Image (cartoon, grey):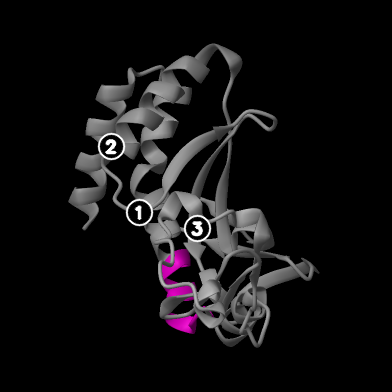
Amino acid sequence: MLIHKGDSTLCGGGVTPAGRLGGNRHPRRIGYGDVDMSLIEFASLRQSHPVDMIEWVAAAREWAFERSGDDEIAVAVAGVWTDYSVSFSWLENIEALHLGCAFDLKIPAHRRSEVLRLLALINEKLLVGHFDLWQQEGAVMFRHALLLSGGAEPTSQQAERMLATALESCERFYQAFQFVVWADRMADDALACAIFETEGEA
C-alpha cells in the first residue's frame, strides 16, 4: 500500500484524487514524474528477513555458512576448479538481496588491464549477473541481485537458483582468468580456450 501525502492518495490498484471528496470535478491526472518518492511511505508486508531463507537453505543442504549479522551471511562452496566464498547481503534501501561470489585468484597489477578486457568479453555472454574486479582486494567477483520490492518474500528455489547461477558462471569462466593471469594469454584467446575446455568436459 502506498500513501502519498499531497493532493492525491495512491492505493495499490488505482489513484483516488483527494479533491473528489471536496467536490473537485476536475481532478488532475498524475503521471510518473509527478510522484515525489520522498513523500511516499511503504507499508512492508514482509514476514521474515530475506537472509533467513538463505540460512535455511544452507542448513538444509549442509553447506558451511556463517551469519555475521542480520543482513549478511557467508556460504563456503567447493567447486571443480577452486573453492568459492559466496556472500549474501540484504540491501534494505533498495529491497534487494545481493550475491557476491569470489574465488581465490589475486590479479597482479601488470595483468589488470587484460583482466578487465576479459571481464567485458565474458559479461557480453551473460544474461543474468556479471563479473567485475574488486579493486580493493584485487580479486574477481561474480555479482547478482534479486529484487524483492513491496515486501516480497524470497523462495528456497530462488535462493538455490541464485547460488547455482553464480557457481555455474564461475566454473565456466574460471580457467579463462587463469590463462590471462598465469599464462599471459590475451583475453579473447583465453576465453576461447576456456569455453572449449569446459564444453569438452560436458
Q: Amino acid at mark 1?
A: Val
**Could you say which is closer to the camera, residue 130 or residue 107?**
130
Helix, strand or loop under label 2: loop
Query: Which residue is the site of mark 1?
Result: 128
Is residue 94 depicted above or below 102 in this figure? below
Q: Nearer the viewer, residue 91 or 106?
A: 91
Q: Earlier in the sequence, mark 2 or mark 3?
A: 2
Residue tagged by mark 2? Answer: 124
Q: What's the magenta bit mostly, secondary-structure-wise?
A: helix
Q: Position of residue 26 (x, y in %)?
A: 40, 67
Q: Mark 3 or mark 1: name the one nearer the start of the chain.
A: 1
- What span is in magenta? 153-163
Tell me what residue is drawn at x 69 percent, y 70 percent: 65
Report if residue 80 is visible in the image: no
Which quarter of the rendering shows the N terminus?
A: bottom right
User: Three-letter amino acid code at disc 3?
Assistant: Ala
